[in-house]
Image (spheres, rainbow, N blue to C red):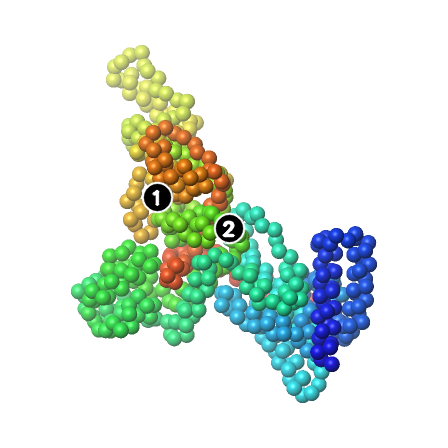
Amino acid sequence: MRHAITNSRVTCLIILTAMGLSFVFGCATANREDTAADMEDVKAEVKDTTPHEITANIRQRIDNPHSIFINSQTIKASSYLASLYKQYNYVPMWSTPDGPLPQAYEMAEVVKNSYKEGLNPEAYKLSLIENTLDRIKATQDSGSTAKPEDLAELDLLLTNAFLLYSKNVLYGQVTPEQIDLELIFGERRIDLSELLVTSIKNNNVKETLDGLLPKYPVYGRLRTALAHYRELEAQGGWNPVPPGPKFKKGSRGPRVTALKERLIVTGDLKQTAPVDDIFDSTLDQAVRTYQDRNGLYVDGVVGESTLESLNVPVEQRIRQIVLSMERWRLLPQNMGVRYILVNIANFHLYAVQNNTDVLNMRIVVGKPKWNTPIFSEMMTHLVVNPYWNIPPSIFRDDIAPRIRSDPDYMSNRNIQAVGLSVQKPESEDEAALTEAREEYISKVLSGNYRLRQNPGPSNPLGRIKFLFPNKYSVYLHDTPNRGYFQRAQRNFSHGCIRVENPVGLAEFVMSPDPTWNDEKVKATINRGRTQTVHLPEPLTVYILYFTAWAEEDGSVNFHKDIYGLDRVLQNALNDTRARRTDMATNIH
């Protein structure tokens, strides 16, 4: 009898799914009148094959479009839940009169394992789901049929969990607007209600939900890293290295012993290394490995910056991984076959093709108060041997004070005021020339003229700039100041992004046109003429912010929250959770 009822239930669901979804989304070829008539027939069949008690309990527990009533608790519901059940005449999705379907246990397992994605299982009511399943099992073990109210509550909990979880892994827990992230999207939003019904019908709930996770390799590596660092946390994490003066190879003492113990925990020093108080060559190499991995200056010396990084507790490293995973979920599922990803926090740019980094270079980003914004936009062209049109803010805050203190500043740097020239005086005496130059500088300092620096070796944009028009006037560019790339923390610009390998980047963005190879890029530069070159195919530039990053070899590097944006994201997550709780507890 159990087998017969189950098959009847699944058959009903399949029919309803096929008919209902084609009606709602207009995919069927039948006309509306025929489809509507078919829907009425299906609903009639549902009433004949679905116990009234379960359906009545489901309807009763949908408090309003925003909440469900479970086990004497009012719970915030997905905005899709009420309309989904109404569309299917309150048919139970996850059970038959004999008990839960296998898909129900599969969904419960997905919720239980959501912590592996950096999510909180209790956000999807894991405890209530497990308690309800336990009650149903206890009832069945006693030889009785599962109670309709328990099956109804389980159905609502699992449906709500599916809808919330799928939304969170597909679009993130917060909105981009909450963290000032502006992205261009070319994707059609997925109907999560349709996804739920289809995944139950096809008996592939977990596979469906796994398919919504970010596809980028870094995300998968961060998931692995999260599990590893949670293991370290369970084992007690690591003890801090005591404060004191900097020390290096040749040093001795208890701080050296503490350093060895600390580096063994994270695998930078082999477990077979002797834990004594001697700073030997093996420890020197381990310190250099740690520094290189975490974007510190690599010198083998344990100074202030290295000690600060070493002593960040494991709990904070876990939080960085979790926040970085959330940032990946906010991105489009398909970022493109070819794209550029800038990670502000680790000062690197990645040119990506087919989900593989084909180019990786150091960058310089905005300094404090000149933060590089996080957004995405389409790169359309580059300029070889560019002029530098000096922004008014840089003129006001940086250039003007230099001109006041050095009258030859502009001429020495080949800077011109567009539309303004020095009026040659009638007299050639020194006083007349000085007066004419002072008048010119006075007009420049008035701010009424646009200043630009001509192309050349001292031009701050170097030999190439890469343009993706945006409201921030931010772009990528070369620079004559190569020394900045040797520094560990590279936030020195006015917001634009200086790139270490402009020729390699130009070759990448022009690669759909095979004639634009390394030689052609260099030859175009060497001509010395300003030339605008349109890309064969526009590609997206993502300027993003991840303080935790995982490399291809599985190593994880952590970076300072230089702009305080991890704190902004954490506050947004806390605010989202608080509003979810408030709406659940203040419905009545």
Residue holding disc 1: 501
Q: Amino acid at mark 1?
A: Asn
Q: Quadrant of residue 420?
A: top left
Residue holding disc 2: 335
Q: Is residue 221 visible?
A: yes
Q: Residue furthest left?
A: 250
Residue appearing at x 44%, y 47% in the figure: 340
Given residues 306 and 334, the one toward you in this image is 334
x%, y% of residue 319? 44, 64
Residue appearing at x 27%, y 62% in the figure: 287
Given residues 559 and 220, the one toward you in this image is 220
Label 2: which secondary element: loop
Q: Residue furthest bottom?
A: 142
Marks 1/2 in contact by CB < 8 Å: the verdict is no
Q: Residues within 10 Å of mark 1 (few under 14, many from 20)?
A: some
Q: Earlier in the sequence, mark 1 or mark 2?
A: 2
Quadrant location, the C terminus = bottom right
Rendered view: 442 above or below 164: above
Quadrant location, the N terminus = bottom right
Given residues 463 and 581, the one toward you in this image is 463
Residue appearing at x 38%, y 74% in the figure: 236
Q: Is residue 398 visible?
A: no
x%, y% of residue 527? 34, 29
Q: With 336 as the anchor, is 398 left or right in this view?
A: left
Label 1: which secondary element: loop
Rendered view: 427 above or below 488: above
Q: Residues within 10 Å of mark 2 (few under 14, many from 20)?
A: many
x%, y% of residue 434? 28, 20
